[in-house]
Amino acid sequence: MSIMTLSLSFAPASAPWSEKALVSFAGDSATVHVPPAAFSTPALLLRGLQKAARQIDSLGINQIAFQGDWTAQLQWAFASSFGSYKQPATIVWLENADKALLEKRYQALQFTRELVNSTPEDLAPQTLAERAAAWLKELAPGKVTSQIIVGEGLQQAGWMGIYNVGRGSDRPPVLLELDYNPTGDVNAPVSAALVGKGITFDSGGYSIKSSEGMLDMKCDMGGAATVTGGLGLAILQGLNKRVKLFLCCAENLISGHAYKLGDVITYKNGLTVEIVNTDAEGRLVLADGLMAATDTDAPLIINAATLTGAAVMAVGNEYNALFGLDKALQKRVMDYAAQEDELVWPLPLESWHQEKCPSAFADTANSRPVKGGGAGGASNAAGFLSRFVREGGQGWVHMDLAAAYNGSANAYQPAGATGQGIRTIARALLEE
């Protein structure tokens, strides 16, 4: 198939197309029709372009070239919804000053999506860590070093959350510690640390999920993919500050060696945690990563995770949820997201959320022993995480990735990973 040229028009479609048509065609050309009034409502304009992208994709067209009056923002809105896992897109950007940036964004987006869309059989915990490290080393030759702590080595090093969650699988859990240090100075300060949840498959453990709830659990490593994609995008955009990346990778499976309800985990910082729900495993692995990130003395720590169904219930599948005890930082990250046209919404987090999961046998439980963690489950999970960062949570934000994945295609997005969040993280790394 030849490449279809794509133009933008502010006039209605003409015959033989309906005046209400979003897209019209003439030979190898297509026109997206945007009412002038849509420009007064940017969110509706961008959703209109996403919808047009899905309509064109549904016709089996997978190669387009922009022409005419497309801004970078409008090209991106269309491109990020065009194509699918089964029908990858070929996109020719406008030949102008925006092209280089759009190509870099798309490269990071495609890497993130490919990682999340990989089957759980193909993406073992160690494979996830190795693919993330290899990509970042390819982007910045000579500037990235890494180590992977595997299996029993995690227990020996004291990373008890990752170890316990992953010990039920024949494929061992791992912690990736990656250092992007563009100066090469071993004493250079770490400007930021990123932490990602890398559960490559989540059965729920002994708190087993339903078949329907388990179907999409290959995406439970979306946090690891998102922070990796965000760092990669920042590197592509010229990041000149030192950043450390921690990916907490495991399969949460059932076996005779799996962790169980009623177990108590003792963390490196001395905190004891009673397991009341083995399906609240993401916070258990992130705790290790957050302690490692805090040890770097980085003034900025961002973690990302497909952490709670409660966040999806609160904000839907279009927004990611953002939590922070550091309200000034939370506001700045919200502003970065707005500048990047990524939908993020703040949810409540106060220091007293740490006490919302009490235990009679440990300092805290990992959840509440009620379905879905009970009321305020997303905030309670964030409160748990806040126990593992600096006092008062200064310099730390937690992104709960409610918008990371679509189980099926809809009018605005293809099925699978969205990559939403990578641009916000990249901007935060560049700006903070």
Image: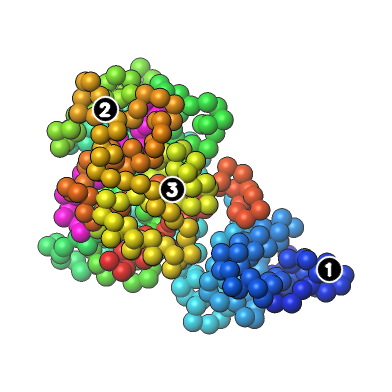
Q: Residue at x 65, y 73 (%)?
A: 37
**Quadrant (top left/top right/bottom left/bottom right) for the N terminus:** bottom right
Instruction: Tell me if 62 is positioned left or right of 273 in this view.
Output: right
Q: Are marks 1 and 2 in contact (CB under 8 Å)?
A: no
Q: How many marks?
A: 3
Q: State the residue position of label 3.
A: 401
In terms of secondary structure, where does tag 1 sit?
Answer: loop
**In the image, which residues are magenta?**
277-299
Q: CA distance from mark 1 to mark 2?
A: 62 Å
Q: x and y percent of residue 43 in the render?
A: 56, 64
| Viewer-proximal residue among 82 and 184 | 82
Q: State the residue position of label 1.
A: 17
Query: Disc 1 residue type?
Result: Trp
Above or below, comparing residue 403 to residue 269 in the picture: below
Instruction: Tell me if 181 is positioned left or right of 376 in this view.
Output: left
Badge 1: residue crowd in 10 Å (few <14, some 14–19, many ≥20): few
Q: Are marks 3 and 1 in contact (CB under 8 Å)?
A: no
Q: x and y percent of residue 153 in the render?
A: 22, 34
Q: Residue at x 44, y 35 (%)?
A: 201
Q: Is residue 232 magenta?
A: no
Q: CA distance from mark 3 to mark 1?
A: 39 Å
Q: Is residue 285 magenta?
A: yes
Q: State the residue position of label 2.
A: 358
Q: Nearer the viewer, mark 3 or mark 2?
A: 2
Q: CA distance from mark 3 to mark 2?
A: 25 Å
In terms of secondary structure, where does tag 3 sit?
Answer: loop
Above or below, comparing residue 341 to residue 170 in the picture: below
Answer with the quarter of the image where residue 234 lies.
Answer: bottom left
Q: Residue furthest right?
A: 16
Above or below, comparing residue 57 to residue 117 in the picture: below
Q: Residue at x 20, y 28 (%)?
A: 363
